Image (spheres, rainbow, N blue to C red):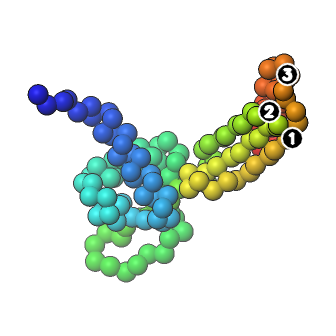
Amino acid sequence: MRERVDPTAVRRTNLGVVLRHIAGAGSISRARIAADTGLNKSTVSSLVAELIELGLVQDDVHAGRVPSVGRPATPVVLTSTTVALGLEIGVDGLAACLEDLTGAVRAEVRALSDLRGSDPSVALDATADLARDV
């Protein structure tokens, strides 16, 4: 018996493939993404449009145009949006970290303190303060 494929899961997976490809490549055209990933060009265009709508990528208006036959490609790049906040609560301190889609750390703050036996609300309030600071 064949298992049914969930089209929503396939689309989410393909969004991840395209986003990771853009993150790894920097500025890249939709056609190049399609060629590199094996996805259909129209599928890539649709996925990139969704990523643009989500604010994760944008057209690279600063890319130089290479003279060629046909319509010139407009490369896409990641936006400079920070998209991940990591928080750590440990027995010996707290930490907060911001990362962008490439995995580059944009900001990081650590606060050392002995939290053993402390009220959890104290640790959570201090962690919220670190998150605001970072």
Label 1 neighbour load within 10 Å: few <14, some 14-19, many 20+: few
- Dot 3 or dot 1: first in sequence order is 1
105 relative to 73, above or below: above
Question: Which numbered mark, 3 or 1, is in the foreground of this view?
Answer: 3
Name the residue nearer the viewer: 41 or 114.
114
- Determine the residue positioned at 84% across, 19% down: 119
The picture places residue 98, in percent across and down from the top left corner, at: 68, 46
Q: Quick one: which residue is furthest to the right in this view?
A: 113
Check disc 2 and report the residue beneath it.
Answer: 91
Mark 1 / mark 2, whichever is N-terminal: 2
Label 3: state its secondary structure. loop
Q: Quadrant of residue 4?
A: top left
Can you give x and y, in whole percent of width and height, for residue 1 in the image? 11, 28
Locate residue 13: give its quadrant.
top left
Query: Residue 112 has which mark?
Result: 1
Q: Are marks 3 and 2 in contact (CB under 8 Å)?
A: no
Q: Marks 1 and 2: which is nearer the front?
A: 2
Instruction: Identify the residue at image location x=62%, y=42%.
Output: 84
In x, y percent, where is residue 23?
A: 50, 58
Residue occupying the point 34% across, 46% down:
14
Check the image and name the residue furthest to the bottom.
Answer: 67
Side of 104 relative to 69 (left or right): right
Q: Work out whether residue 114 or residue 76 is closer to the camera in this orientation and state it.
A: 114
Residue highlighted by disc 3: 117
